[in-house]
Amino acid sequence: MKQEIIQVPSSDILARAAQFKKDGYRLVQILCTRIPEGYELTYSFDRDYIMTNMRVIVPGEGSVLSVTGQFWYAFVWENEIHDLFGLKVECIAPEVDYGGHFFQLAKETPWHELANAKPPAAAFKVNMRSGLGIDATVKPAAPNTGAAAVKPAVPNTGASAAKPAEGGK
Amino acid sequence: MGKNTIVPFGPQHPVLPEPVHLDLELQDEKVVKAVPSIGYVHRGLEKLVEKRGFQEYVYVAERVCGICSFGHGWGYSKAVEGLMEIEVPKRAQYLRTIWHELSRLHSHLLWAGLGADGLGFESLFMQSWRLRETILDMIEQTTGGRVIFSVCKVGGVRRDISDADLKDIVSRLGKMKKDIDGLVSLFLEDETIHARLKGVGTVTLQEAKELGCVGPTARGSGLAQDYRLGDEGGAYKELGFTPVLETDGDCFARAKVRLREIYQSVDLIKACVENIPAGDIAVPVKGFPPAAEYFARVEQPRGEALYYVKGNKTKNLERFRLRTPTNANLAVLVKMLQGCDLADVPQIILTIDPCISCCER
Amino acid sequence: MSYLSFAREMLGNLLKPPATSEYPFKPRKVYEADRGKVINDINNCIFCGMCMRNCPSDAITVDRNARTWKINRFACVQCRECVTNCPKKCLKMDTEYTTPDTKKTEEVLQGPPPPPKPQIVLTEAQKAAIAAAQAKKAAAQKAAAGKPDA
């Protein structure tokens, strides 16, 4: 199914939202993504199970106007964007502007940081739980290993040199 | 008229095992304003997609919520399949439909129990959950898990259901019919339930449209909003499907929608078993998701959920978003609570079937 | 609409046996498909690490040098992904669940020492062929590296 995304300057949000409302659309969600330039907001509108998306790029220090005037229920997502991403949303309908108290979180705006610059896909996953002081019990499975303790690394296996990161702690 | 009082409700509350906190502003016994706050179980699962391979993440997506676990797995897989342009085999679509409807049965029966418990009708609660146990057994028999199915994967499903098991499911569902009838007639005819639910928390059709309701909450107000009519995938298009509608818009109508959907799900499973084609259950997935975006939607037991994925040509996705049905229904909840009695608050919250941990990916 | 509508159901329930089972005394019904816990036949394991890389909860650690296979049973989510991806099919899903514990522990399985590498005995003719091939390759490399003077 083709998915339509319309690029819109941030000054046009309210006019566009009003047009969508007039055309009988329903606001499905507001999506926020952190991008290097700031924030990428996508407003999804649905009519008869066909969705149209409106995309707005907001610069890092900027703010965005609320669409609660047209779609009152957008306050759920606008508060969410404010609490999780730290993007200021202005003029939310006063009775539903929770001012950063919608999400009770231990850390403020946890999703503000950019998607981490990842190493290429071939990089090995590092086990995050080792080294946390989890007790290790050793269960010798093979009858021919008599010792109950984990042996230090056996030096000979030929293939081990190829992937040094694999056993990494 | 005295001064307004603020009564905190939740996140720990006897009738509602969901971590939502509401500040209820009361004028005498009437609620004039409700301020919700969530985030008590926020786990940052959307962010975790950056650290997990796109195929592994199905298992994380399933664990967003226990009750709609299959729906989340399916929705995520559907979004990635759309992104990578993978065509899922027919049999896999039918199997997904069967499991999805089983999970709807399990969710609605769980809701019936919780709803009865919220009314103080403990024996009806036990009765519903006893029925749910039969469904859980079917799920365990076919998937290996009772609540977390782990059968959906990108490109299809991981397990097949043998013909014998399919027949077994149908015959067990047939045997359950009498018990379901008993449960539903109890719910719909009992005087105490009428007294507690009728005329409480009414949402008119116009309000339901304006507040963006989804799922049984919308259908209880007569709004035919069911994504199974849209591009759901699965076998819904072929089997034919009409959403269950009620027009009263009160708590009782929403309960009625869910109870009637139990019958509908049973019928859908039977139709699926009759029409299921033979063939592959999965297609191999090669390569990484392209640098593109895709939106997918799935009708879950609680309503329409939206999944968004954005790839970046690596093993990990760049962004995953999940808008759950409860998230969309929070607005109508806030509206409904304005002007209701304090004693009706638990019923009103329960009849939107909230799943707060769904809201806090 | 009726009052005491549950009475009929209740009387029926009185005559029926309990719907629950006496769990610790009677074992629960186990299905073939059940995902209980992962078990590893360590003698067949080749320590390739596929299970570790595919684990969504990072519960498995494989050390190829030390020939150990570790699992944190309390982090494992029983998704069965490791079993699906095991190239030697030495991982299996047991239908029994992990028993509860007061401490989070890791289970370490120590594999047997690797089988000795087969010694290849070469005949004189083969050795000569290898030497000739190596010399040819070296010459070709030299020709490619050094710019032709002529």
Image: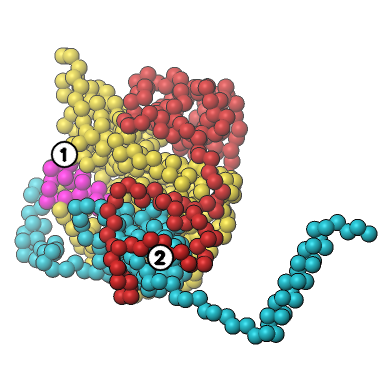
The amino acid type found where label 1 is placed reads Pro
Q: Is C31 a magenta residue?
A: no
Chain A color in figure: red
Residue B132 horizontal/vertical position (percent): 23, 57
Residue A157 horizontal/vertical position (percent): 48, 67
Residue occupying image coordinates x 20% and y 49%: B113
Rendered image: mark on residue C67: 2
Cα distance in 3D space between marks 2 and 1: 51 Å
- The answer to whether C143 appears left or right of B353 in the picture is right
| 10 Å crowding of disc 1: few (<14), some (14-19), many (20+) | few
Residue occupying image coordinates x 54% and y 79%: C119
Chain given the colour yellow: B
Q: Quadrant of residue B273 in the image?
A: bottom left
| 10 Å crowding of disc 2: few (<14), some (14-19), many (20+) | many
The residue labelled by disc 1 is B14
Residue A130 horizontal/vertical position (percent): 36, 51
